[in-house]
Image (cartoon, rainbow, N blue to C red):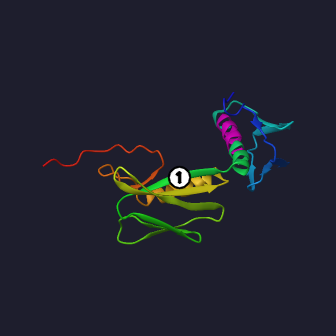
Amino acid sequence: MSRIGKKPIGIPAGVEVNIDGRIIKVKGKLGELSYEVPRRIAWELNEGTLTFTRESDLPSVRALHGLARALVQNMVTGVSEGFAKRLEVRGTGYRASVSGNKLTLNVGLSHPVVVEFPRDVTVKLEGTTTKDQLPTTIVSVSGIDRSVVGHWADQVRRSRPPEPYKGKGIRYEGEYVRRKAGKTG
């Protein structure tokens, strides 16, 4: 039995779970999400808990068992609390600005990098500080769908990943970047 798949999902107060055929719809104070459960996975909703079972022990079905449970758990957490990723834009002259649904990054390239984000993702700038003698701007990415928030934050990070010599670039908050020694001379 899958260790993740067999754990029941607790439905918090204020969250509605509706089942329509193979589609599970979760609605909460932050929004609504839906997921179509694979055919070989069954579920049961009892007194505020949702449990998943599988019909066989084939490796592909076992993988879907844990995946289905994890995706529905993320939906429940997303509509009740939401998800957030924080990015640090670190470097001298590196700036970020938000206008409408676009994030504009000036990160040492010959042109500004403009990244457009979807409607259900919220992007905020949370001020500038100094870390390791480099000016740092915090960009907060939040939303109800964990995969969309993580994917969009990764797209922003890929526009200028952190470099190992001076530590400049875009990184997740708390991410460790292994520093290298420069040339001696």
> In percent of the image, x 75 and y 53: which residue is there?
34
Residue 24: x and y, percent?
Answer: 79, 48
- Extreme residue toward the right, this view: 47
Say what secondary structure mark 1 lies in. strand
- Extreme residue toward the top, this view: 1
User: Between residues 174 and 63, which one lies in front from this camera angle?
Assistant: 174
- Residue topped by disc 1: 86
Residue 12: x and y, percent?
Answer: 78, 42
User: Between residues 7 and 98, which one lies in front from this camera angle?
Assistant: 98
> In percent of the image, x 55 and y 56: which residue is there?
140
Q: Is residue 88 left or right of residue 53?
A: left
User: Between residues 90 and 48, which one lies in front from this camera angle?
Assistant: 90
Snapshot quadrant of residue 41: top right
> In percent of the image, x 66 and y 53: which residue is there?
145
Residue 78: x and y, percent?
Answer: 69, 49
Kindly identify the amino acid type of the residue bearing the numbered disc 1.
Arg
For the question of whether residue 21 can be seen, the reply is no
In the rendered view of the protein, which quadrant contains the N terminus? top right
Span colored in magenta: 62-72
Q: Give the main secondary structure, helix, strand or loop, of the magenta stretch.
A: helix
Snapshot quadrant of residue 33: bottom right
Q: Is residue 144 left or right of residue 42?
A: left
67 in magenta: yes
**Residue 6, placed above or below residue 182:** above
Residue 96: x and y, percent?
Answer: 47, 65
